Image (cartoon, rainbow, N blue to C red):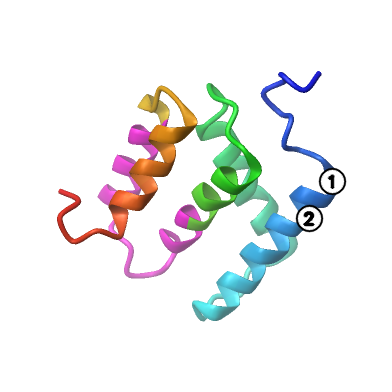
């Protein structure tokens, strides 16, 4: 059972990630209810469902998706990020993708 793609989905971890997403949303000046945060988390899960990322990687994906919900986010960047996620062959590639977003030389 530990090899299940959803091995990171214990209730405590899910709650902790969702609480952190709500706190991040508030820090960004956004207010998201629990349902919106849950939907965001589920979207992140769906985008990396072809892999078995650890909880931290999944939380980072959800965090990037949250940032992309800001009013000034470019919809093309969001589509690009989602397509890149789906092409990642492993969890390490997801981490590299996320890290590249904050580097000035990313593209």
Location of residue 11 in the rendering, given as x and y in whole percent from the top left corner: 84, 46
Circle 2 Cα neighbour tier, 10 Å, few/some/many (<14 / 14–19 / ≥20): few
- Residue at position x 41%, y 28% in the image: 86
Residue 46 vs 57, above or below: the answer is: above
Q: Is residue 69 magenta?
A: yes
Is residue 45 rendered to the left or right of residue 15? left
Are dots 1 and 2 in contact, CB under 8 Å?
A: yes
Residue 49 vs 28, above or below: the answer is: above
- Residue at position x 44%, y 34% in the image: 92
Is residue 82 rendered to the left or right of residue 21? left
**Closer to the camera, 31 or 103?**
103
Part of the protein shown in magenta: 64-85
- Residue at position x 50%, y 59% in the image: 66
Residue 27 vs 104, above or below: the answer is: below
Question: How many numbered marks, from 0 up?
Answer: 2
Among the 4 quarters of the image, the one containing residue 33? bottom right
Secondary structure under badge 2?
A: helix
Among the 4 quarters of the image, the one containing residue 25? bottom right
Location of residue 78 in the rendering, given as x and y in whole percent from the top left corner: 35, 49
Residue 75 visible in the picture: no
Secondary structure under badge 1?
A: helix
Q: Quadrant of the N terminus?
A: top right
Q: Work out how far the residue at label 1 is from the one at label 2, CA to CA, in angstroms.
A: 6 Å
**Closer to the camera, 48 or 39?**
48
Location of residue 51 in the rendering, given as x and y in whole percent from the top left corner: 54, 24
Q: Tag on residue 55?
A: none
Q: Is residue 84 magenta?
A: yes
Residue at the spot of label 1: 11
Residue at the spot of label 2: 15
Residue 97 visible in the picture: yes
- Per the picture, the main secondary structure of the magenta-coloured stretch is helix
**Furthest-right residue in view?**
11
């Amino acid at each position: 059972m530990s090899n299940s793609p959803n091995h990171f989905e214990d209730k405590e971890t899910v709650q902790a990630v969702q609480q952190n997403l709500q706190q991040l949303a508030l820090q960004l000046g956004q207010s998201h209810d629990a349902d919106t945060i849950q939907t965001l988390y589920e979207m992140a899960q769906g985008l990396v469902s072809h892999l078995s990322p650890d909880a931290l990687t999944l939380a980072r994906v959800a965090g990037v998706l949250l940032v992309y919900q800001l009013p000034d986010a470019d919809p093309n960047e969001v589509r690009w990020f989602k397509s890149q996620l789906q092409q990642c062959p492993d969890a390490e590639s997801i981490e590299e993708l996320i890290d590249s977003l904050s580097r000035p030389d990313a593209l």
